[in-house]
């Protein structure tokens, strides 16, 4: 399929007539009482058509006629990308759903079907709110329950026993984040001194990861664990549900801890004091390990801080293209500080 044709196919996720026909053909396989769609409302959460790609995430409120003549309501979501990446993401989600994340306290969204022509898949919407959305409440927000659930969910993923039915990709900073490589190229053109600084950071991160991986027994990692992918009905919820499985791979479990911590820091500092951000980061880590900071084996801290550095660099790349130079410089300072902690091996996860 040619690129322009691919982009048009993905954009059909936001076409009411196409989706209604698609649901009439497919939903009966997943809802035994389904007869036909009676009402369909669409909301595009993400709608991007650029020169090189098309990315859509669309939500659907569906009212359908059931076999007993009643009207039932369901909420569905479709996600598509013209690069074809959603096919593997759908397979990963299916695997997790079928291997213990379909019931109980620690959940993933329920997958439904893949649309080959549209490079997209459909899944049941997660009822609730992103953890990040609660941050805007107040400085004294009690996040203890949410942090416990988030730590326990990812710990369950890290301890999941794998069978040989799925060929998992391997996580590495060498393979993840083409935006960082583009950032590296573009920032040299923008500012050679800054570009050389970024070049050294990236080289240091890669060298440290290669050294750590020599003695690593990899497990499943989420790959981009952060508060916007965590769904809760409330801060007192008994269950947690995860969305977006694009980056799930085999790797160092500290990838997820470093990712969650750095993005908790970056997202949280706009709403909370530094003292609260530092406290919540330490609370998450102690929840995961079930130990006080001083009792957690020292070997984990350089790896956690390595991935805090990596995610800070990725965030800097994102903000560079938004022309937020002050934030980019601040994040690059933080990358260097995290790398100092990697070298020192200190039992620290906070910079300030």
Image: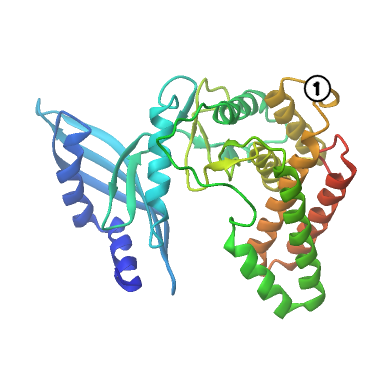
User: How did the renderer colour the structure?
Assistant: rainbow
**Is residue 321 visible from the viewing direction of this image?**
no
Residue that extends furthest to the bottom in the rendered view of this protein: 189
**Residue 172 position (above or below residue 215):** below
Q: Position of residue 51 (x, y in %)?
A: 44, 75
Residue at the location (68% across, 30% down)? 141
Identify the residue under disc 1. Answer: 292
Expressed as whole percent of the image width and height from the top left, the position of residue 288 reads 68, 26
Q: Is residue 26 left or right of residue 325?
A: left
Q: Quadrant of the N terminus?
A: bottom left
Q: Quadrant of residue 261?
A: top right
Closer to the camera in the image, 191 or 230: 191
Is 117 located above or below residue 233 in the figure? below
- x, y percentage for residue 93? 41, 38
Q: Residue at x 71, y 57 (%)?
A: 313
Q: Please say if 193 is above or below 128.
A: below
Residue at image position (49%, 21%) is 105
Quadrant in the rendering for residue 217: top right
Q: Is residue 333 left or right of residue 132?
A: right
Look at the numbered disc 1 and give the secondary structure of its residue: loop
Quadrant of residue 96 within the rendered picture? top left
Total labels: the figure holds 1
Q: Determine the residue positioned at 25% across, 34% down.
A: 73
> Relative to residue 291, is residue 159 drawn left or right?
left
The 10 Å Cα crowd at callout 1, few under 14, some 14 to 19, many 20 or more, is few
Residue 289: percent from the left, percent from the top? 71, 24
Above or below, 99 against 310 in this view is above
Task: Check the picture and name the quadrant holding the C terminus.
Answer: top right
Q: Is residue 124 visible?
A: yes
Q: Is residue 16 left or right of residue 75?
A: left
């Amino acid at each position: 399929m040619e690129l322009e044709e691919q982009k048009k196919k993905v954009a059909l996720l936001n076409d009411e007539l196409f989706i209604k026909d698609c649901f009439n053909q497919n939903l009966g396989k997943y809802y035994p009482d389904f007869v036909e769609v009676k009402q369909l409302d669409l909301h595009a959460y993400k709608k991007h058509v650029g020169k090189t790609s098309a990315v859509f995430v669309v939500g659907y409120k569906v009212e359908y006629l059931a076999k007993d003549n009643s009207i039932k309501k369901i909420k569905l979501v479709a996600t598509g990308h013209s690069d074809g990446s959603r096919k593997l993401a759908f397979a990963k989600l299916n695997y997790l759903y079928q291997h213990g994340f379909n019931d109980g306290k620690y959940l993933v969204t329920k997958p439904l079907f893949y649309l080959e022509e549209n490079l997209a898949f459909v899944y049941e919407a997660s009822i609730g709110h992103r953890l990040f959305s609660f941050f805007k409440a107040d400085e004294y927000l009690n996040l203890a329950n949410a942090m416990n659930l988030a730590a326990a969910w990812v710990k369950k993923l890290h301890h999941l026993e794998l069978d040989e039915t799925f060929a998992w990709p391997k996580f590495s900073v060498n393979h993840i984040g083409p935006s960082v490589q583009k950032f590296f190229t573009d920032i040299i053109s923008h500012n050679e001194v800054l570009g050389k600084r970024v070049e050294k950071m990236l080289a240091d991160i890669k060298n440290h990861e290669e050294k750590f991986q020599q003695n690593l027994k990899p497990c499943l990692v989420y790959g981009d664990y952060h508060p916007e992918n965590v769904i809760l009905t409330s801060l007192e919820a008994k269950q947690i549900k995860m969305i977006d499985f694009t980056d799930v791979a085999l790797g160092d479990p500290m990838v997820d801890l470093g990712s969650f911590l750095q993005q908790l820091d970056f997202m949280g500092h706009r709403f909370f004091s530094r003292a609260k951000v530092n406290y919540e980061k330490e609370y998450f880590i102690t929840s995961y390990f079930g130990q006080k900071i001083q009792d957690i084996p020292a070997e984990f801290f350089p790896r956690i801080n390595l991935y805090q550095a990596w995610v800070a660099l990725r965030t800097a790349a994102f903000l560079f293209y938004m022309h937020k130079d002050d934030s980019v410089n601040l994040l690059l300072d933080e990358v260097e500080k995290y790398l100092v902690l990697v070298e020192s091996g200190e039992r620290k996860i906070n910079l300030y």
